[in-house]
Image: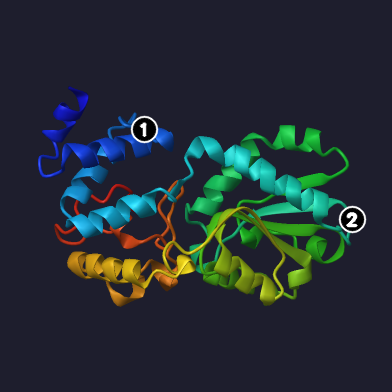
């Protein structure tokens, strides 16, 4: 009865596919009915119904590896990556840590995901300080407020963000500090989730990276040209621009954070003049 009722809302989707999608959501502990009526399940079913069989099979298969980090999980992930940083970093200038959101200069003052992450950390700051009493842990909500002299002499600048894709944002954000004679050795980057190719690229350029969850590219990491061709047809169908084919920077991400990164395959988030109007994770 449940599936029949749901199928009336996505009449072009087979009962079999409806059941597969429901089992997928249950297995991944994703909500069937959202608290704020986002209706991710319904949207996902309707999106699949608008694809041909081969395309729908690909998206369901890719979604098996999709990572949805919900807001309730941010604290746990930050605790894990921060602890890894504490345990392995040498702290050459003493045990003083300066937390700051990772922001390019053009985004100063904007409410970006890195700022949200800092606000979450601030809510738990007393507990964090209690857990690591040998450290002095301070914060600021903008790179423009960082005490640069302190970073140069007695503390480690810890730039935090929820997601790193190609690494371009890291390079743009850290340029503000590099221009002010703060070296890469005086900074560390903490991210909850990161694309492995972006993380490795940043490490090769001298950045010190700590990431909670690393993710490979969704298709080409497995070497499937057939899947890639199906995805190209999907993206042509929904009108994805060249800059976002396979996600920004061809990242092939299968990730949703508080906001879906544009590095994720556009079928999950891109809506274009009535095309792909049931994208389950719109930005």
Could you classify mark 1 by the number of other residues whose Cα lies within 10 Å: few (under 14), some (14-19), or many (20 or more)?
Answer: some
Could you classify mark 2 by the number of other residues whose Cα lies within 10 Å: few (under 14), some (14-19), or many (20 or more)?
Answer: few
Residue 38 visible in the current orientation: no
Q: In the rendering, at what x and y percent does residue 251 appear?
A: 45, 67
Q: What's the mark number on residue 227? A: none
Residue at the image position 46 percent from the left and 65 percent from the top = 222
Q: In the rendering, at what x and y percent does residue 115 appear?
A: 55, 50
Residue at the image position 80 percent from the left and 33 percent from the top = 130
Is 173 in front, or is 180?
A: 173
Residue 158, picture quadrant: bottom right
Protein image colouring: rainbow
Q: In the rendering, at what x and y percent does residue 181 appear?
A: 75, 75
Is 222 in front, or is 195?
A: 222
Residue 226 visible in the current orientation: yes
Give the secondary structure at mark 2: loop
225 is higher (above) or lower (below) than 158: below
Give the side of residue 139 with respect to residue 130, left or right.
Answer: left
Which residue is situated farthest in the top direction here? 1
Q: What's the mark number on residue 94? A: 2
Residue 129, picture quadrant: top right
Residue at the image position 52 percent from the left and 35 percent from the top = 72
Q: What's the mark number on residue 31? A: 1
Q: In the rendering, at what x and y percent does residue 21 appear?
A: 29, 40
Q: CA distance from mark 1 to mark 2?
A: 45 Å
**Between disc 1 and disc 2, whose residue precedes?**
1
Give the side of residue 66 with respect to residue 166, left or right.
Answer: left
Instruction: Give the quarter of the figure containing the N terminus.
Output: top left
Give the secondary structure at mark 1: loop
Between marks 1 and 2 in the image, the one whose residue lies nearer the viewer? 1
237 is higher (above) or lower (below) than 30: below
87 is higher (above) or lower (below) than 216: above
């Amino acid at each position: 009865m449940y599936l029949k009722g749901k199928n009336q809302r996505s009449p072009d989707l087979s009962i079999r596919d409806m059941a597969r999608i429901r089992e997928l959501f249950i297995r991944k502990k994703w909500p069937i009915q959202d608290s704020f009526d986002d209706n991710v399940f319904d949207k996902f079913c309707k999106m699949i119904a608008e694809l041909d069989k081969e395309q729908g099979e690909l998206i369901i298969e890719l979604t098996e590896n999709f990572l949805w980090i919900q807001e309730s999980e941010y604290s746990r992930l930050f605790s894990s990556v921060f602890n890894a940083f504490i345990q392995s970093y040498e702290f050459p200038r003493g045990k003083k840590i300066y937390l700051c959101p990772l922001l390019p200069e053009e985004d100063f003052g904007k409410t970006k995901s890195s700022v949200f992450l800092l606000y979450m950390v601030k809510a738990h700051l007393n507990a964090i300080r209690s857990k690591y009493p040998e450290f002095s842990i301070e914060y600021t909500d903008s790179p423009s407020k960082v005490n640069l002299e302190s970073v140069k002499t007695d503390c480690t600048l810890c730039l935090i963000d929820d997601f790193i894709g190609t690494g371009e944002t890291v390079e743009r954000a850290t340029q503000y500090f590099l221009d002010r004679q703060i070296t890469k050795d005086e900074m560390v980057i903490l991210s909850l989730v990161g694309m492995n190719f972006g993380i490795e690229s940043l490490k090769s350029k001298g950045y010190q990276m700590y990431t909670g969850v690393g993710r490979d590219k969704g298709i080409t990491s497995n070497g499937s040209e057939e899947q890639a061709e199906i995805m190209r047809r999907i993206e042509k169908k929904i009108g994805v621009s060249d800059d976002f084919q396979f996600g920004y920077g061809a990242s092939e991400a299968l990730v949703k954070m508080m906001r879906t990164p544009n590095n994720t395959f556009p079928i999950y988030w891109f809506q274009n003049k009535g095309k792909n109007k049931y994208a389950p994770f719109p930005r």
